[in-house]
Image (tube, rainbow, N blue to C red):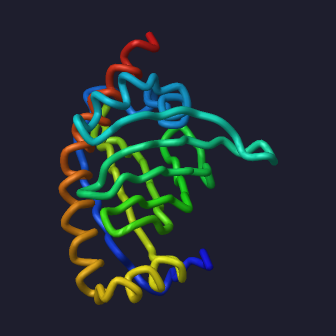
Amino acid sequence: MSDVRSDLVLSQSAYAHVINAPVGKVDIARWLFSLPEAEYQRCAPPDHIAAGATSTDDGRPMSINVEMIGTALMIQHYVGEITGRDHCRMVSLSDVFSPAGRTKVQVIWDLSVRSVDDARCMYLNSVTAHPTEEFLAFIKEHDIPFEQAAHDRQTASSDHNSRETPLYAASIERAALASD
């Protein structure tokens, strides 16, 4: 029942922030897959709880993140579809623990940088969530209209993303400048 409904969007947000380092010094994949847990926690206090890096059975890099999005505890199992210096596209079939119970959603986390000038680049942190069939059955069972679930998720996710983006950018900047 965890088939993803990519035709439906629960939430979508994207925020950008300047990194005061040349794009050539940034390595998003290296930063993401070596991010210390304490640094992850500093990037969205108090929402970020735990993080770690691992791999799938077939060797693809993964980032495991535990965080609060609104009133839901999210366990993100991000698999790297694209894992480059200037772009990572991470896709997770995420466990959601809400006050009403447990379900699953798909979350796509897209991290990228583009050059602004010789000394700066722009970081873009984009997050999109799609329901699963399991999620749709869950909200139906709890008499929650999809529109309400999407509104609540959009509000919580946008708030979270707006707070973590500048802190992620600062962390990526520190990593880029430390590579000298």
Q: Tell whether 147 sits left or right of 76.
A: left
Q: How many marks?
A: 0
Q: Nearer the viewer, residue 144 or 62?
A: 144
Q: Quadrant of residue 55?
A: top right
Q: Tell whether 121 sits left or right of 46.
A: right
Q: Considering only vertical position in the picture, is 110 above or below 59?
A: below
Q: Residue at x 40, y 59 (%)?
A: 97
Q: Residue at x 61, y 43 (%)?
A: 62
Q: Tell whether 177 sits left or right of 92.
A: left
Q: Nearer the viewer, residue 27 or 39?
A: 39
Q: Considering only vertical position in the picture, is 176 above or below 69?
A: above
Does residue 155 appear anywhere in the picture? yes
Quadrant including the N terminus? bottom right
Q: Position of residue 79 (x, y in %)?
A: 61, 51
Q: Tell whether 144 sits left or right of 8.
A: left
Q: Position of residue 10 (x, y in %)?
A: 35, 75
Q: Considering only vertical position in the picture, is 170 above or below 174?
A: below
Q: Position of residue 113 (x, y in %)?
A: 39, 44
Q: Residue at x 44, y 80 (%)?
A: 138
Quadrant including the C terminus? top left
Q: Residue at x 52, y 54 (%)?
A: 89
Does residue 119 appear anywhere in the picture? no
Q: Nearer the viewer, residue 141 or 4?
A: 141
